[in-house]
Amino acid sequence: MRVGLGTGLPSGAAGATGPGWVVPDLGQPIRTIGRRTFDFDHRIAVMAIVNRTPDSFHDKGRTFALDHAVEAAVTAAEQGADWVDIGGVKFAPGPELSAADEIERVLPVVEQVAEQSDVTISVDTFRPEVAAAAIAAGASVVNDTTGLADPRMAAVVADSDATIVITHSLAAPRQEYPKPQYADVAGEVAAFLRLRVDRALEAGISEDRIIIDPGHDLNKTTVHTLELTRRLPEVVALGYPVLAAVSNKDFVGGEPRPSPRRTAVRDARGRDGECHARRPHRPDARRRRVRRRDAHGRDRPRLASAPGSEAQHVTHLPDPISDLSDDELLDVYRDGAEGTADGGWLRVNFVSSLDGSSTASGKSGSLGGDDDLRVFDLLRRVADVVLVAAGTVRDEGYGPMVLHDADVAWRREHGLSDHPVFAIVTGSLGLDPASRVFTDAPVRPVVLTSASADPSRRHALEAVADVVSCGEDSVDPAQVRAALVDRGLPTIHCEGGPSFLGALVAADLVDELCLSIDPSLEGGEGGTHRARVVAGAAVDAARARAARGRGRAADAVRACAMTAPGGR
């Protein structure tokens, strides 16, 4: 994925370009690994974990028996895992296990899973002989937690078609490493990975077969891992897909085995959009979280749960909202939605930090959590059309307007089309007709522009969308609303951006504002990366609703404070 932040790299760091920096594009974002193909520019991959060990810190040997291990791997694939990571010996300290014994544990699982599923299979090992045997049995990834400490491992992978995951660690496998110390943990991890990538390349492993892992909690204290997570863009800047193995690690609060609740909070604050693969112990839950983002672009807007602001009419959702069913939650939003003179209803959905910023590091997708994503998806479920300004579509990496299967089923039951129409507002028509927004759209999108817009761009977009003029020299928000209502799309769900919301508010066109507050402070002095929710107009008439969830918000505040002692 491409990551762009306003700050974050130290001066002189790889990828730094002065006050702002841009992470380089992945050289080979589309990769075939085993029998599956991945597009790491547009989709986070989910790796499931199967430990065929009697002493796993997580499951305490639950999948040590062969049939249990195979069943767990196949079930994970059926639940949506993209690949399964099979290990026969843990990295942490423990008694010695011979290579022959490790092969005896791993190979039968690899062979049987390969027979029963097309899921990508990786083997978690630091031994070249185990890797060679696993590759021959059907594994297509070697997950080396020592980061090619043994040069023979690079040779084994180079002689195959397998992919290598190069992980940062300091200790020898199964050995204690007391009191790890770093002068600059993120910089040192990035430098280590850069050297080990060079080792892989020199051995003959091509760039399109290399993935890197910063090694969360491997020979790192809680403070080290939190700082590494905060500065993960410096690892991404190396230009290779990044695996984040954060599931059930103890770096949040120093707890040895955090509950699923705490793991979810960590994921929400853990910069999902800056890695390309996630390694959870519960792939079904993790898959639901990442797929909600992937369905509409990797960094689509996300909501937050917190109290609302002053307005003419404020409705607070019950606390916590997780106690409500989808239908009960939708009833809260439908309650009081009155008819209007033109028969339309324009609802705006936004997230803000505590100090009023609509973005974190230039992305609204960096704000919010799972409860808010649920509200976000439900509001799309009931909309006839989703309305977004072109700048937000580009900045947030929107994809096609495709709903989840449950949302489609609900819409059919309620007499709606399977998916809402995607409507994009643009004065310049600066949209790419070859974008997935248009090429993969289930419903022909609508582009709302001015009559004076560039004729050649209009002609190009007319091949993939309905282009509608809403004003002569500039886009008139009132004509935008009228055009959508006239097309039989009265329930309008607007997702930004701030300038467009300001224009809608100034024209008194907003019927309802759904505003959530992320429990974070963004600071800064305004500008692109500190934009207000509303730009260019004062809010004095919008009807507001705010989603609130004190339990989740409190955890998120704690996680945020821990990850950003000097700010975010």
Image (tube, rainbow, N blue to C red):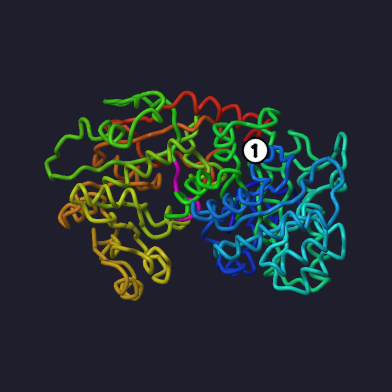
Q: Residues within 10 Å of mark 1 (few under 14, many from 20)?
A: many
* Image spot of residue 210 (x, y percent): 71, 64
Find out whether residue 40 is within the magenta segment.
Answer: no
Question: In the rendered view, would you say 350 is above or below 139?
Answer: above
Q: Amino acid at mark 1?
A: Asn
Direction from residue 290 to residue 244 in the image, left or right: right
* Image spot of residue 114 (x, y percent): 60, 64
* Identity of the residue drawn at 36% across and 66% down: 438
Direction from residue 64 to residue 375 in the image, left or right: left
* Image spot of residue 478 (x, y percent): 22, 49
Q: Quadrant of the N terminus?
A: bottom right
Any part of residue 12 in sight: no
Q: Quadrant of the C terminus?
A: top right
Direction from residue 477 to residue 100 in the image, left or right: right
Q: Secondary structure at mark 1?
A: loop
Q: Report the residue marked by disc 1.
A: 248
Q: Quadrant of residue 209?
A: bottom right
Q: Magenta part of the protein: which range?
A: 297-302
